[in-house]
Image (cartoon, rainbow, N blue to C red):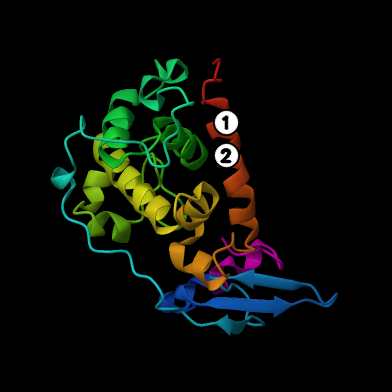
């Protein structure tokens, strides 16, 4: 998430910084006067810009088994002029479609969006682990998994990983009143980062690249409306 303005040699330095610092936002002004923002400072020249806000905290969630019956759903921000997202011919035969369909229905999320996130996060590799410790298909951090009742070992299960990721994504969509761009930015950078920057996509290079990438996947998986 942090801009690598001084090269990979600074990665080791970043690991030595306190973990709690990642909750705040830092700024570095380079020699050309350009400002670089990050929530994970990897250079000692970064200075505190904004403290962690307390405007909104995601509500505690129960175990994965507490999801609604998959037949009891409605898509968030539905439109009668759109095709049924749960009967999308473009998703047939895609990897893990059964798990995606179940979790999407249970959490009232478009399954095409879920596939777009999986494609961007792991390219459908259930064993993927990022250098920050995010796990599986939807790259779930262990802390996020625990909030939804999943242990680290559970996150390597495609079914459990998708269940956690979709539930978290649904909460973010609700938190930002159906704004998919802000929900995706929060999924990548954390909801607090989006709040800190006035409910806008944070100016982190990774997040600024991530959001349009997922949206391109998403658009490619949505059937055209013919009526």
Magenta region = 1-13
**Disc 2 packing (10 Å; few <14; some 14–19; many ≥20):** some
Q: Measuring from the top left, give residue 188's x and y in whole percent.
A: 49, 54
Residue 43 falls within the magenta-colored stretch:
no
Residue placed most toward the observer, 106 or 32: 106
Q: Quadrant of residue 49?
A: bottom right
Q: Does the CB distance between marks 2 and 1 fall below 8 Å? A: yes
* Residue 41 picture quarter: bottom right
Q: Is residue 163 above or below residue 176?
A: above
Query: Image height check: is 36 above or below 166?
Result: below
At x 27% / y 64%, what residue is drawn? 59
- Residue 219 image label: 1
Q: Residue 192 appears at what percent x and percent y?
A: 46, 68
Identify the residue at image location x=85%, y=75%.
32
What is the crowding at mark 1: few (fewer than 14 residues within 10 Å), some, or many (at least 20)? few
Q: CA distance from mark 2 to mark 1?
A: 6 Å
Q: Camera-side residue: 173 or 151?
A: 173
- Viewer-closest of 194 and 134: 194
Residue at (59, 72) in percent of width and height: 42
Residue 139 appears at what percent x and percent y? 40, 47
Q: Residue furthest right?
A: 32
| Residue 156 seen in the figure | no
Q: Which residue is mark 2?
A: 215
User: In the picture shown, does residue 52 fall above or below 149?
Assistant: below
Residue 90 in view (yes/no): yes
Quadrant where the N terminus sits is: bottom right
């Amino acid at each position: 998430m942090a801009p690598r303005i001084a090269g990979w040699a600074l990665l080791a330095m970043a690991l030595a910084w306190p973990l709690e610092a990642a909750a705040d936002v830092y700024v570095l002004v380079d020699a050309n006067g350009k400002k670089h923002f990050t929530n994970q400072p990897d250079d000692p020249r970064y200075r505190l810009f904004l403290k962690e806000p307390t405007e909104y905290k995601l509500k505690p969630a129960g175990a994965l088994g507490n999801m609604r019956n998959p037949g009891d759903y409605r898509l968030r921000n539905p439109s009668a002029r759109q095709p049924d997202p749960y009967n999308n011919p473009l998703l047939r035969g895609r990897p893990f479609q059964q798990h995606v369909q179940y979790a999407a229905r249970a959490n009232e999320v478009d399954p095409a969006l879920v596939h777009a996130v999986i494609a961007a996060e792991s390219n459908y590799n259930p064993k993927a682990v990022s250098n920050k410790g995010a796990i599986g298909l939807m790259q779930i951090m262990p802390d996020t998994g625990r909030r939804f009742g999943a242990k680290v070992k559970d996150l390597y299960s495609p079914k459990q990983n998708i269940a956690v990721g979709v539930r978290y994504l649904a909460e973010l969509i609700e938190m930002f009143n159906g704004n998919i761009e802000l929900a995706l930015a929060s999924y990548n950078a954390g909801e607090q980062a989006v709040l800190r920057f006035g409910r806008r996509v944070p100016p982190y290079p990774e997040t600024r690249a991530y959001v349009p990438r997922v949206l391109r996947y998403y658009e490619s998986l949505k059937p055209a409306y013919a009526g």
